[in-house]
Image (spheres, helix red, strand yellow):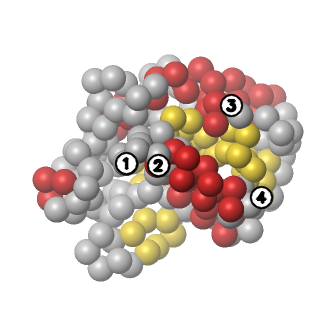
Amino acid sequence: MTQPYGPEVALIVVDVQNDFADPTGGLYVVGGEQVVQVVNAEIATARAAGAPVFYTQDWHPPVTPHFAKDGGVWPVHCVAGTWGADLRPDLTVSGPIVRKGVNGEDGYSGFSVRDPSSGDVRATELGNLLKDASVRHVVVTGLAGDVCVKATALDAQELGFSVTVPLAATRFVNLQEGDDERAIAQLRAAGVDVTA
């Protein structure tokens, strides 16, 4: 962890939910359960230093063009109100939760959602929450490193925050072989500090 926590440094915990972080989940990320204790340690360090902690949570309707059965690319996951959409029970939750994909949008980034039919993009409340807290730097952890963690980190960088992604606190889907390496390269090329 190269960035010390403090009031201007926020921790963003991305989608540490049963469907991603439990082997029986609908879109299990291999090793996803292993990040929970690492992320909990980050949360404890952040809170002890007075840093705010924010969480994102996929929260999809049962029918959405985001899902393969409805024309998208992903198996059914994180359907609102189900066990799969719940944050992991062993995750420490100590801050606001930003839900994404609520109206059937693609919710990759914690900062924005995209209508999969029209392509229209709109902001979530995360950016305003960070600005209201006078945050300048964000540490992005959670699942998955090549999808929602990457999208959240890139959006944060584009919005003017400096960004750290600690690899110990994420795992990768690798829908295509090498997605992890490509994601890390893309993050570094954008100026994100990717650490071990």
Which of the two marks, 4 or 3, is nearer to us in this view?
Answer: 4
Query: What residue is drawn where x is 35% and y is 77%?
Result: 119
- Residue 101, position as x, y percentages in the image: 36, 57
Residue at the spot of label 1: 176
The secondary structure type at the circle numbered 3 is helix
The secondary structure type at the circle numbered 2 is helix
Q: Which amino acid does label 3 sit on?
A: Ile
Quadrant containing the N terminus is top right
Farthest residue toward the left? 69
Residue at the spot of label 2: 179
Q: Which amino acid does label 2 sit on?
A: Asp
Q: Which of marks 3 and 1 is nearer the N terminus?
A: 3
Q: Which of 187 and 178 is in front in this view?
A: 178
Residue 104 falls in image quadrant: bottom left
Q: Which of marks 2 and 4 is nearer the N terminus?
A: 4
Query: What residue is drawn where x is 26% and y is 74%?
Result: 117
Q: Which amino acid does label 1 sit on?
A: Gln
The residues bearing labels 3 and 1 have C-alpha atoms spaced at a distance of 31 Å
The secondary structure type at the circle numbered 1 is loop
Q: Which of marks 3 and 2 is nearer the N terminus?
A: 3
The residues bearing labels 4 and 1 have C-alpha atoms spaced at a distance of 28 Å
Residue at the spot of label 4: 162
The 10 Å Cα crowd at callout 4, few under 14, some 14 to 19, many 20 or more, is: some
* CB-based contact (under 8 Å), mark 4 and mark 3: no
Residue at the spot of label 3: 43
Residue 166 falls in image quadrant: top right
- Residue 97, position as x, y percentages in the image: 52, 45
Which of the two marks, 2 or 4, is nearer to us in this view?
Answer: 2
Q: Nearer the viewer, residue 23 or 95?
A: 23
- Residue 123, position as x, y percentages in the image: 51, 69
The secondary structure type at the circle numbered 4 is strand
